[in-house]
Amino acid sequence: MLTHHLAEGAELRALEPWNAGEFAEHVARARDHLRPWIPWGTTIVDEQTAREFLQSFADDQAKGGRRIYGIWLDGTLVGGTLFRTFDARVGVCEVGVWLEPSATGRGLVTTAVRGMIEWAVCARGMSRVEWYCNVDNKPSIAAAQRLGLTCEGVLRDLGTLNGTRYDVQVWSILAAEWRSRT
């Protein structure tokens, strides 16, 4: 996938180390919005930390593992999606998302993740696609519901962000369930 059309003026494409400057600018713009939900929202502070972060995904993708994509709206990076984990041997991956407030309400995340799940299940043979989110992240929960994922429960005190522990909802869809919906 070089470019995947999401909507008028919007596309999903690989977010690579050479995009580090643009990614650092995006994180700076969205930092206050990202901070409550995403650890790297506070650790990516310049082009170097952005490059290191993106390089870690490029290295993992080269080994068949996790990968990261950006969402561009009218030529500006406004968010992204990722396979936070991707284990083809076990057949399980986890999808994650983020989006600047200015780009919400357009269906970009839903459309992007549908394509990712389709690829993971149908092209890569994943048996299970997971979605983890903070129990207080209402937009993330709504996106999981729109995608038809099932809430399996809450893992209490699973995460730590900005020095505070939080509970995580686990959502998933199995390959057979996904195929029956499409």
Image: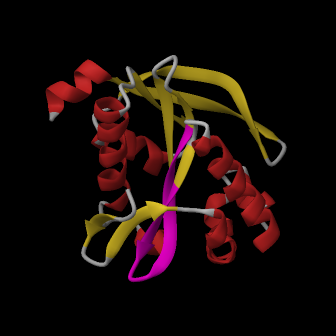
Q: How many marks?
A: 0
- The percent coordinates of residue 80 (x first, y second) are 50, 59
- Image quarter where the C terminus lies is top left
Question: Magenta: predominant secondary structure element?
Answer: strand
Residue at left 28%, top 66%? 5
Examine the rendered structure and indicate whether residue 12 appears above or below residue 96.
below
- The percent coordinates of residue 107 (x first, y second) are 30, 60
| Nearer-the-camera pick, 65 or 92 | 65
Residue at left 60%, top 44%? 62
Q: Is residue 152 rendered to the left or right of residue 134?
A: left
Q: Farthest residue in the right direction?
A: 163
Examine the rendered structure and indicate whether residue 11 appears above or below residue 41.
below
Q: Is residue 29 rendered to the left or right of residue 53?
A: left
Residue at left 37%, top 44%? 116
Q: Is residue 19 rendered magenta in the image?
A: no
| Residue 23 visible from this viewpoint | no
Question: Magenta residues, as a range?
Answer: 69-84
Residue at left 55%, top 62%? 15
| Nearer-the-camera pick, 94 or 54 | 54
Examine the rendered structure and indicate whether residue 159 appears above or below residue 1.
above
- Image quarter where the N terminus lies is bottom left
- The percent coordinates of residue 112 (x first, y second) are 35, 54
Examine the rendered structure and indicate whether residue 54 appears above or below residue 46.
above
| Residue 85 visible from this viewpoint | yes
Q: Is residue 75 rendered magenta in the image?
A: yes
Q: Farthest residue in the front direction?
A: 62
- The percent coordinates of residue 174 (x first, y second) are 33, 21
| Nearer-the-camera pick, 27 or 55 | 55
